[in-house]
Image: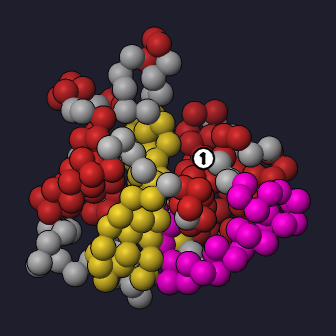
Amino acid sequence: MSFSFAAGDEVGQTGWKFERGSTRFFAVTLILTSEPHMIREGVESLRRDLRLPVAAEFKFHSTPRASRLTFLERAATWPLMARALYVDKQLLPVSFRKLKSWEFYGFFVAELMDRVPLGELGNTSLVLDEFGSPKLTLHVVREELRRRGLWGSQSRLLKRMVFRRSQSEAVIQVADMFGGALYRWLTENDEVYYQLIKSKSLVWAYHPLRINPLT
């Protein structure tokens, strides 16, 4: 079954100055659904229950622990699936260090989409959280997808692809929270958050020869 809507977000940095705070890991998360309105309504309901302002935005790094747990517990009941890809930058070939930030981002967005199980994408509208210059980054992502046969007249996987601010799209906020749960597991070996959404998720570690998802 193809999902008609997808929203994505990234976590971690594309830089290489680890001694100055650049992150070791970088990850991209996609939320797939055919009922985005139900997810938006779920996020809105959660804001009310947590007595948050109508415009409050859910971001993993700034959301209190109790609210994170509540969010992920609720999200696990919503009509969605999560697909994520992470990379340990310290293990990448030197050639990756020559990429611009938007090229690095575009490469891994495309790598994730290339791993999404057959049939899950079909005439899907993809909304990504803004990254860098939207116009430039969108061009790079499209070219990376085209190179893999995932974009263009011969591919019917995507109906459209756009960038939006996460504040304006609740499903991107879900991608942020799911990505944050995965990132906490990677960086701190803390599985508490990820275990809540594990049944909804497929996660891959980037390696040119590895195609099977992790559990």
Residue at image location 63% in from the left, 53% down from the top: 177
Decide if residue 206 is on the left or right side of residue 95: right
Closest to the observer: 63 or 86?
A: 63
Residue at image location 37% in from the left, 75% down from the top: 125
Q: Secondary structure at mark 1?
A: helix
Q: Is residue 55 at least partly visible in the picture? A: yes
Is residue 2 depicted above or below 185 in this figure? below
Tell whether position 39 is magenta: yes
Is residue 124 depicted above or below 55 in this figure? below
Tell whether position 98 is magenta: no
Residue placed under numbered mark 1 in the picture: 180
Residue 12 appears at what percent x and percent y? 48, 36
Instruction: Tell me where the magenta segment starts and ends, as one range.
Output: 28-56
Residue at image location 51% in from the left, 78% down from the top: 33
Q: Quadrant of residue 45?
A: bottom right
Decide if residue 181 is on the left or right side of residue 151: right
Q: Quadrant of residue 76?
A: bottom right
Residue type at mark 1 is Gly
Decide if residue 180 is on the left or right side of residue 136: right
Q: How is the image coloured?
A: secondary structure
User: How busy is the neighbourhood of tag 1: few (under 14 within 10 Å), some, or many (20 plus)?
Assistant: many
Of the 4 image quadrants, the one containing the N terminus is bottom left
Closest to the observer: 90 or 67?
A: 67
Residue 4 appears at what percent x and percent y? 42, 82
Residue 28 appears at what percent x and percent y? 43, 51
Please, which residue is most extreme toward the bottom here? 1
Decide if residue 58 is on the left or right side of residue 100: right
Q: Is residue 121 at least partly visible in the picture? A: no
Residue at image location 72% in from the left, 55% down from the top: 56
